[in-house]
Image (tube, grey):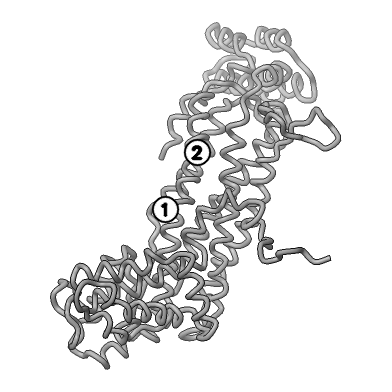
Amino acid sequence: MRLTNIESVSLSPLDGRYKAATSELVEYLSESALNRERMRTEAEWMILLAGGIDGKTPVLNGVSPFTEEEKAYLRSIPEDFGEEGIKELAQIESVTHHDVKAVEYYIDARLEAAEEKLSGSSQLSHLKPLVHFACTSEDINNLSYALCIKKAVENVWLPAFEKVIGKISSDADRFAGLPMLSLTHGQPATPTTLGKELAVYAYRLGRQLKTLKSQEYLGKINGATGTFGAHFAAVSDADWIALSREFVENRLGLDWNPLTTQIESHDWQAELYSTVSHANRILHNLAVDVWMYISRGVFAQVPVKGATGSSTMPHKVNPIRFENAEANLEISCSLLDTLSATLVESRWQRDLTDSTTQRNIGVAFGYSLLALNNLTGGLESIHPNETVILKELDENWEVLGEPIQTAMRAQALAGRDGMDNPYERVKELMRGNRIDRDDVKNFVAEQNFDEETAKRLSELTPDTYTGIAEKLVEFKNI
């Protein structure tokens, strides 16, 4: 039996099961959002051509600088692009079979209605030739994609990323002095503090955040093969380079790329996706580490009222938020890595491989955003289990072998007798053995330490052997 009302059934989980968690990206990275930015780019290009850089000197004969009312009307085209406009544009594209040409015709229809809509007469109704003037589709597309991506990153993805970093950072401060047994190679090792381990992640992620906040978003408007050929053929006395730079930088708020083929080279996109993918992998490491801390009992989970951990084992509280984040980060990285690798290549002056590839940008960010939301929720639902943490430390007195043998080395270098072969002597006592406080105290007492060192070592316990871990937390903010 086929599904009824099949058009309402989602193929992608981002538009179905996870829609509520990722819907913010629709405003910036959907097909409709891209078309809105295409309209915005076309309208702003018309405004620049009509008034020039100073707003008073038209670039083309037969066009006068737009009135404020005319500018507002043009800018209302993308702003008013809603459900009815989306349907109308789709109908136009079903005839043109070309998305950017459909946008041009959509704007043409609004220009035809300008005189009727505006008070008094308006030149807009006669300016259809100005729409898409001297542009190739990629002039509009590259700028529109840059606007979409920039807004999505700055307004949606980065705030979610910063929220995770903020939670990790605040927990690092809260638990800066909480001792915890380390495991290197899965074996008990020099104790640390929970806060210091979280601070490591805050620092790592902070470096990626710093890179992302300085990210360039490049754009170009220079014609069919990047030569301004049509521009100079039509109007040879205009400073098209200055106009292009003005448009990209000051009118759209992007970074101007002066040298391209037909397409903007997408290097900035590859850089952005590589950085986001790198951040994803650090977050993946965090999700796996926290999952294992939960399994070990270092973190306890707060049960969600009414939630089911297992369909058959009622006692279970599964760390599903971290597992969900882990899987979705992997999917996001796969897509971002593909985008980074493929978008930087184009056959000679243009091919269309980037066209279909770029339509998956929203999917790549969607899975990452979903993971960020799960990580935030997961981190907010756990807390340290100090009973387990302290028990682990108390059961592993052998971790004090490191400070004892290191102190013996220092004493030997200072010329104190009886401190030969410190590593081997401590290894004989501790390696593979379960020892306790008395064993450590007795070993220290048997050595020829000076009085101050002997006192310091005899008072050392696994939960106090954390070095300056608490102080190191201060360095988490770069």
Vertical side of 426 occupied by 238: above or below: below
Q: Is the residue 219 above or below the residue 226 in the image? A: above
| Badge number at residue 202 | 2
Q: Is residue 421 visible?
A: yes
Q: Quadrant of residue 101?
A: bottom left
Rendered image quadrant of residue 230 = bottom left
Q: Nearer the viewer, residue 417 or 78?
A: 78
Say which amino acid is labelled 2: Ala
Q: Is residue 408 left or right of residue 113?
A: right
Residue bearing mark 1: 154
| Front position among marks 2 and 1 | 1
Q: Quadrant of residue 188?
A: top right
Crowd class of label 1 (few under 14; some 14 to 19; many from 20; radius 10 Å): few
SS at mark 1? helix
Q: Nearer the viewer, residue 285 or 115?
A: 115
Could you tell me residue 284's position as x and y percent? 62, 46
- For mark 2, give the secondary structure: helix
Q: Quadrant of the C terminus?
A: top left
The correct choice, above or below, for 229 with respect to 255 in the image is: below
Q: Amino acid at mark 1?
A: Glu
Q: Position of residue 335 (x, y in %)?
A: 61, 62
Measured in 3D between alpha carbons, the distance from the residue under mark 2 to the one under mark 1, in whole angstroms, is: 20 Å
Q: Identify the residue at horizontal 52%, vertical 26% (top origin).
A: 469
Is 296 left or right of 375, judged from the image as shown? right
Q: Count residues near mark 2 (Cα–Cα under 10 Å), then give few for <14, some for 14-19, many for 20+.
A: many
Q: Residue at x 67, y 30 (%)?
A: 304
Q: Which residue does the image show at 57% across and 66% down from the upper left? A: 360
Q: Is 434 left or right of 79, judged from the image as shown?
A: right
In this rendered view, identify the residue nearer to me: 51 or 461: 51
**Residue at the limit of the structure toward the bottom, as seen here:** 233
Closer to us: 196 or 356: 356
Number of numbered callouts drawn: 2
